Image: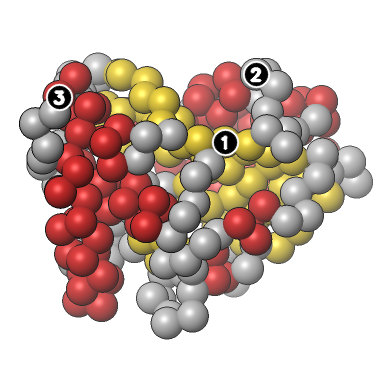
Amino acid sequence: MKRVILTTCTCDNRYIDVLKVFLMSMRYHGNKDLIVADLINGNKEMYAGLRRIYPNMEINHIIIPEVTLLKLMHTRPPQMAKKLTEGWDQIMSMDCDVIIRGNIEGIWNNVEPSTIKIMDKGSTKKDNYRFQGGVYLFGVSQVIKDYYNDIMDIIGGEFDFFDGQAALYRVYKNKYSKQITKRNLSKKYNCSRFKKNSLVWHCKHAYLDNEKFQKEFQIYLKEANKYYDQTQ
């Protein structure tokens, strides 16, 4: 199976450390999947340091003047759309603000062609129902390509770039629920409550300074900087 993990990060003073921790925690626990990263406003020295942390990595260098979260979100749908045409069997989208806390090989299980593996976010309001972002996987097929093309058609129009999860859900429900198999992603692979037995802690930006998250974050950051700061 050819598989790849996609992520995006802005290379400012705060989030470059977030990316280091993601990469170091992947490496520490023996995860070796290819990571393709859209990196915003980085430089060659920075990229070299990141590759020392996690060698199996491809970097797309993107310049966005006066970067905002909305502009950052603009890079994600085209990145996924492009990868769906490149012959991959399985594709995972993963936010960079995560800590990998064990081997995540099991996350790829049961991701057959024409499958989406994702968590439901839910809502008490019917119109606000959506899938949970942060981590999700596609089993690539022509149906999945068509599904994502339809998502691209409404993101930026009916749904803005902050509502990607809502667009994923709406298009699936309205058109593809009988063509695409939806599998529920276990919370242990996308946990924002930082439970001890979870394999992926996702801080969702707002919880980056959470004491429990930061305790593990600093351990991995210290290890990551040993590679990042090497001069050769």
Residue 214, compared with residue 73, is above or below; it is below
Q: Secondary structure at mark 2?
A: loop
The answer to whether residue 207 is seen in the rendering is: yes
Q: Give the Cα separation between the discs numbered 2 and 3.
A: 28 Å
What residue is at 41 percent from the left and 52 percent from the top?
26
The numbered mark, 2 or 3, whose residue comes first in the sequence reads 3
Residue 129 in the image, given as x and y percentages of width and height: 62, 59
What residue is at 63 percent from the left and 68 percent from the top?
186
The answer to whether residue 8 is seen in the rendering is: no
113 horizontally vs 79: left or right = right
What residue is at 47 percent from the left and 66 percent from the top?
102
Q: Residues within 10 Å of mark 2 (few under 14, many from 20)?
A: few
Which residue reaches farthest front? 232
Given residues 193 and 60, the one toward you in this image is: 60
**Is there a contact, CB below 8 Å, between mark 3 and mark 1?**
no
Q: Specify how the rendered protein is coloured.
A: secondary structure
170 horizontally vs 52: left or right = right
Given residues 107 and 33, the one toward you in this image is: 33
What residue is at 25 percent from the left and 77 percent from the top?
212
Amino acid residing under circle 1: Val
Q: Secondary structure at mark 3?
A: helix
Q: Residues within 10 Å of mark 1 (few under 14, many from 20)?
A: some
The residue labelled by disc 3 is 45
Q: Give the Cα separation between the discs numbered 3 and 1.
A: 24 Å
Which label lies toward us, 2 or 3? 3
Res 185 quadrant in image:
bottom right
Q: Secondary structure at mark 1?
A: strand
Q: Give the Cα separation between the discs numbered 2 and 1.
A: 11 Å
Residue 139 in the image, given as x and y percentages of width and height: 74, 40
The residue labelled by disc 2 is 86
Given residues 20 and 139, the one toward you in this image is: 20
Q: Which mark is residue 4?
A: 1
